[in-house]
Image (cartoon, rainbow, N blue to C red):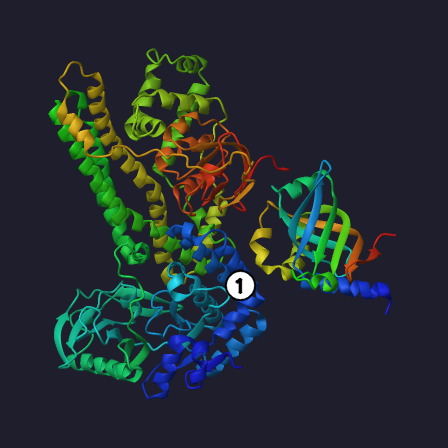
Amino acid sequence: MKRILSAEEIQSGDRNRVGGKGYALSLLAQSGFRIPRTVCITSDAYREYVSRTGLRERILLELHRKDFKEMRWEEIWDCATRIRNMFLVKPLPEDLALEIRDNIGRLLGERTVAVRSSAPGEDDAHSSFAGLHESFVNVTGAESILKHIRMVWASLWSDAALLYRQEIGLDVEESSMAVVVQETVVGDRSGVVFTRSPNDEDQGVVESVYGLNQGLVDGTVEPDRWIIDRSHNRIVEHTSPERKYWMVPGPNSVRLVELPGDKSARPPLSIEEVNSVFKSALNAEAFFKMPQDVEWTYEGDSLVLLQSRPITTLRSQKPEDERIWYLSLHRSFENLKRLRRKIEEELIPRMISVAESMVGTDLAQLSDRALAVEIRKRREINQKWVDIYWADFIPYAHGVRLFGQVYNDALQPTDPYEFLDLLTNTDMASLERNNMLTDLAATIRSDEHLAEELKQGDYSALDARFLSRIDEFIQKFGDLSCAVTGGKNCVLGTGPLYRLLLEMADHPSRNGVRKKKDRISRLHQNYIDSFDDDQKERAEELLELARSSYRLRDDDNIYLGRIEAQVLAAVQEARRRLEEQTGNQTPEVLVQVLGEADFGSEDQKPSLGGKTPGFGYQARQLIGQPAGPGISSGRARVIHNHSDLADFRYGEVLVCDAVDPNVTFVIPLAAAVVERRGGMLIHGAIIAREYGLPCITGIPDATTLIQTGDEITVDGYLGIVTIGKTGI
Amino acid sequence: MEKSERFRIQLKELFSAQALAALSTHHAGQPYASLVAFYATNDLSHIYFVTPKTTRKYANLTADNRVALMVNSSTNNASDFHQAISVTAVGKAEEVVGSERESILVQYLAKHPHLEDFVSSPTCALMRVAVKCYYMVKNFQNVMELHLEP
């Protein structure tokens, strides 16, 4: 049976082998619509590839590391990234590659092509796969086409597809992917048509941009939009954007460039052309007997249909469906650049000044009423910044992911997280804080007298220079006490900070590990070398953005922590007054304000689990996600309450629910990190990597199955925590 | 065909059809069993498997390298009693390191390609069992032996 078919060769019996897109194109071609030259790689080729290369089992292993229900979106993204990399690094068996190369050469020659996903079943109006899988445009050369075919296959397991796995019936044994390889028609105007508007079914929508469609589809280029009244076939509205850019083809990629002045002044389509495009789409609707979403382009004066698919809405419209929000975190480079400017130039400076202005208020001098007003004000400020954190800072973290994907696509490294080496050693606030702690600990280590004073708790006679450095630290990062002692019973004082410093001083210092510079420069050079000359600058820019995104992922929590600490400081002052009050003059205004909200985060309570009385049931080996390479053993310190951090000792393994940058000051003491929350880009993983510590994330019951004091071994290469003695 | 040759052919067929073996180790006289993904050399002299170094089996092997491995063709049906073949290999295990590890892993991964990530970890040990003797059980209780050592 042929595994490579031209659009003209596809027959009705091939429908499931060529996928929805391939089948629809073949019908259009065979019915007289003009489409680009099209070749379909059937899903049999996918099946053969995953069987012969062992990828099917590897995907099964990857998807069964953990129950999907327990995976966060970040873990699903990681899962998709690892699977994608398997496809990137695993070449096709030579005979299959030869067959595809020969047939594409025979049917398309040396043409530049688009390589598009065509999942079986996607033409079914009830289960559109739109947007779940990937397509690539402007691909040139046989080897590049083969690579992009594998990338399309990999997108069967994209994070979006994994999120919607139930709706689309994703199954390793059953699911497969066909690929459409289509000659690139270099249109000078392109767009999409919805024959029925998603907002009003009596209307249709035509959208158009100059150049290739890519900019419109990924949201980088704002289109002209025409609304058409279906019953009268009449344009009822035209919205013009500020036309600034267009996407044009370059060697092996598309690029965004400024639109020439003469084009920016006028819409890409004339009224006649809008009507003509819409009429063609209506013909496709009549042909397929359902409303269509048609992509098209104008090659000179000739209209070419690139694809046509039924309009369906797969994604649940329920507001509680968080998947829509997760997927909205995928941002384009242009979008992230805008976000970066906003965050770095506007939001961060404001956050810092907001926290500083609150520090400047002497709470002890306020009347009870003024203190109550201050608490409410601080709470509102804090809430506002928490909202900004979700709206802008979290999406900005996608800069790291975007870079990771570009890096992996360009270099196909064996380790899908190699790209992180280019992002570490940035000047994160948490590292700056830890370096200051290390320096202070070094001073104590070299000054026996000072160490003795601190051990005795005699802080009154401390050396003035040392105290001024402590003050400088507290000014910048707080005294760590809120984090150490926990939110609700926050004791503002330097005791916990001194205890931490003494523990650090008792042991050799451990700075963030500086990765070998020559390795980093080599990786950097390889990365840049993998781009064409005119794309190198953009590649550098993306790396810069990723570094900023990576740094901010940690820093934003530190800045937010400073604001939150000021809310707690005011609450603490109110509590102190209530405790110290005498007689019957209860300051009601303070009682009331404290009752309005739950101040301070709830400590984590250990849930039932772990050892069951009477049965001796316990964990020996737990599997999670390897997030920091290395292997290390030590006694576990399980953090149930923030106050547990105060007991942290040198050489222990930090076992916790979720590492927050405001608690990572214990990392310089730790032998390894184990975290319940999963993901490769979470704070625990980031800081552990900075210190070169083994780290495992995503072990669902880590804090209940492991007990403080257990001897554990953390294998950060394989993601295995072993409880009890090992042979190593 | 010699009976010993037929024995060898049956072993090869079984080893190519089966992916997993039950490995027996012991610690201070206490036996311990584990499942491992194995690969046997064409001359049947060696059986390879991989294990994380943090496991009990690795600790046991480090303390005492004598092992038994069992491979069988049972299908969890009553017919297993007369149809299934079960082979036990006994011998001594050692860890393979250095350049030899890389060359053997190529053959190992040809049989278990999905373990590529697993074996690439520096904490994953490639173990080689030099087989001293094979015991084959067929037809319910018929046991034949093949000794590889003089």
Q: Residue at x 53, y 59 (%)?
A: A58
* Residue A307, quarter of the rendered image: bottom left
Q: Is residue B12 left or right of residue A163?
A: right
Foreground of the two, B39 or A669: B39
Mark 1: amino acid: Arg
Above or below, A111 against A724 in this view is below
Residue B26 visible in the shown view: yes
x, y percentage for residue A562? 27, 33
Answer few, some or many: residues within 10 Å of disc 1's Cα (few below 14, many 20 plus, some between 14 and 19): some
x, y percentage for residue A129? 36, 68
Q: Which residue is mark 1?
A: A56
Foreground of the two, A728 or A183: A728
x, y percentage for residue A172? 49, 64
x, y percentage for residue A209? 23, 71
Q: Is residue A566 left or right of residue B81?
A: left
Foreground of the two, A635 or A28: A635
- Chain bearing tag 1 is A
